[in-house]
Amino acid sequence: MFKSRKQKKAINLVNPAYAPGDAFTKIYDWMINIGKYLLIFVELVVLGVFFSRFILDRRNNNLTDEINDQIALLQTDPWRTNNILYGNYQKLLADIGMVKGAQKINSSVVSEIVSGIPSTLILKSFSLNGNRVSLHLLAGNLEDVKVYESSLKDNTHYSDVTFSILKEDVEISVAVSFNLVQNVD
C-alpha cells in the first residue's frame, strides 16, 4: 500500500549536540558573538595608533627642524653680540632702578658745572662725591685757568675752591676741587 519513504540518515553539524548550560558552551558562544567584535575593535584601535604614529612623527620632525633652525640663528655672532649687549643693558637698568630710590639725582648740578668750564680748558676727569666736586683739566695757557678760577671763586654756589696747577712740557695740568653750597637734587 503505501510505501513509506526511507528517511536518509544525516548528521546535522549546524545544530550542536552539546548542552547550552555548559561552561565551555558559554565561553564558545561569547567568543563567537561578542569576542569577534571586541577583536575587530582592538585591531582598529591598533591600526589607528599605527597610522597616527606616522602623522605624529612627521610633526615631530618638522618641529625638530624648526627648533634646529632657530638654534642655528641664535648661534650666529651678531645674535650673540646683541644678546650680551642687551643683557648688559638689562642688568644696568635693573641696577639703576635699585639705586634710583636711594640716590640723589645730580644731573642738573653736573650739567651746570660742566657747562661752566670754558671751551679753552679740556675736562679729563670729573668726580662728584656728596657735595664735594673734583675736576682734572688741561689748559694751553695760565690766563684761561685764572679766568676760570676767578669765576668759580666769585660764584656763591661754590665754597672752598682750591686749584692745584702743574706745568708739564706744553700743557698745564689743573686739579680743581670745591664744595657745593646748595642742596644736590
Image: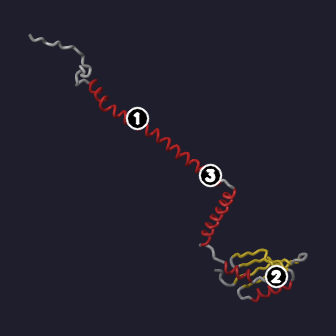
| Whether residue 130 is situated above or below residue 84 in the rendered picture | below
SS of the residue under disc 1: helix
Q: Position of residue 115 (x, y in %)?
A: 73, 82
Residue annotated with mark 1: 43
Q: Nearer the viewer, residue 79 or 123?
A: 79
Label placed on residue 120: 2
Q: Are marks 2 and 1 in contact (CB under 8 Å)?
A: no
Label placed on residue 96: none
In the picture, residue 106 is in which quadrant? bottom right
Q: Are marks 3 and 1 in contact (CB under 8 Å)?
A: no
SS of the residue under disc 3: helix
The residue positioned 67% from the left and 60% from the top of the image is 84
The C terminus: image quadrant:
bottom right
- Foreground label between 2 and 1: 1
Q: CA distance from mark 3 to mark 1?
A: 41 Å
| Residue sticking out furthest to the right | 169
Q: Nearer the viewer, residue 29 or 6?
A: 6
Drawn side of residue 181 relative to residue 165, left or right: left
Q: CA distance from mark 2 to mark 3?
A: 54 Å
The residue positioned 53% from the left and 44% from the top of the image is 58
Q: Amino acid at mark 2?
A: Thr
Q: Amino acid at mark 1?
A: Glu
Q: Are marks 2 and 3 in contact (CB under 8 Å)?
A: no
Q: CA distance from mark 2 to mark 1?
A: 94 Å
Q: Earlier in the sequence, mark 3 or mark 1?
A: 1
Q: Position of residue 165 (x, y in %)?
A: 85, 79
SS of the residue under disc 2: loop
